[in-house]
Image (tube, grey):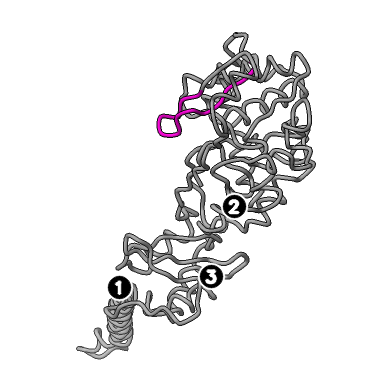
Amino acid sequence: MKKKGDHGREGAPLGFAFRSLAGFLAVLTGTVLCAAVLGLGVFMYLNLPPKEAPVIPAGVETLAFGDDGALIFDVRNGESAASVGRRLEEAGLIKSALLWSLLFRAGSETVKAGVYSLALPLSQLEIRSILVSGRQLLVRVTFPEGGTLKKSAGILEEAGICPAGEFLAAAGNAALRESYGVGGETMEGYLYPDTYLFPRAYPAGQVVKTMADTFFKRLAAIDARILGLSREELNRTVIVASIVEREYRVAAEAPLMAGVFYNRLRIGMALQSCATVEYVITEIQDRPHPDVLYNRDIELRDPYNTYIRPGLPPGPISAPGETALRAALYPESSNYLYFRLIDPGAGRHYFSQTLDDHIKAGVLYVKRSSF
């Protein structure tokens, strides 16, 4: 039997428990919030770019400053995100390699191999966004008309796109040549001279494919029917265009020059192209480019020397541009069999029907390479 005044004592323990739990939850919530705020603060601090200028260790080729002042950073093939983070921290580009690794563990993205331009200062998240995007630094590379594979290889190597040897090997790859229907031993003449944007450390095979694709696109733009030519007819056209490219200086004369070469081929006369002799001297014998050809030069024993060998040379001697390709496809009809440069300054040639008139025109000049 309850005594008077005892009716509230049974609820006391339960009320105390609820108050204790509420207090505990309040403390826990406060602790979590404090930890979250602290963690957020640490993250924000570590995410910020370091105040000190980046350090480029001596002999490290994967770090350099570009012409625009941006840092050039190279992610190596097969390199892990953790390895990249350590290098970024060592270079002073990020504050914490640990945070860098945690960011990648929390997501499914990974760094992509390539060369990137980092316009500092950048936060960790900004750098991460760039390196997982694959938006590599592109280098502008220009190949002048009339260039050769060897000269193009040198340009690519100097620009850091790909080693010269790898480019030449790719240009001579039999499977690649067959895929484009190129009958020669290399892609000489079939890589279009133009300005391209390539990433640094780009596969040589991809460089060759890009330039070859551009060549056939430009060829089709001139006349789509050209792509229907047989392999032999196309190769003949490209060889003539490559010779015209190295001979003409005034664009208006290019179709007339092509007509002269076709006239000679038609009657079985040697082409006698100074450009083919120059090709032998510079590309086959690796000698300096001559300004004037002498008798000893035009007597060089080589299949590419069209002074001593009738018909076309074994393959193209340069990369023809649109003017030369059009000239080879649409030559100007005439009775001329000869032409000779008579005004090196203006680039004008003298065209003639007879050998006597040709000889009277003067010495043999050759077109100076643009490389």
Name the residue type under label 1.
Answer: Leu
Residue shown at the point (53%, 70%) measured from the top left: 81
Q: Which residues are magenta?
A: 337-349
Which quadrant is the N terminus positioned in? bottom left
Residue under label 1, please give it: 48
Mark 1 to mark 2 CA distance (whole Å) = 55 Å
Front-most of residues 209 and 320: 320
Residue shown at the point (62%, 59%) measured from the top left: 163
Residue under label 2, please give it: 288
Number of numbered labels in the structure image: 3
Mark 3 to mark 1 CA distance (whole Å) = 19 Å
Q: Quadrant of residue 16?
A: bottom left
Residue under label 3, please give it: 81
Name the residue type under label 2.
Answer: Pro
Vertical placement of residue 272 versus 121, above or below: above
User: The residue tagged with tag 2: helix, strand or loop?
Assistant: loop
Q: Quadrant of residue 247?
A: top right
Front-most of residues 214 and 330: 330
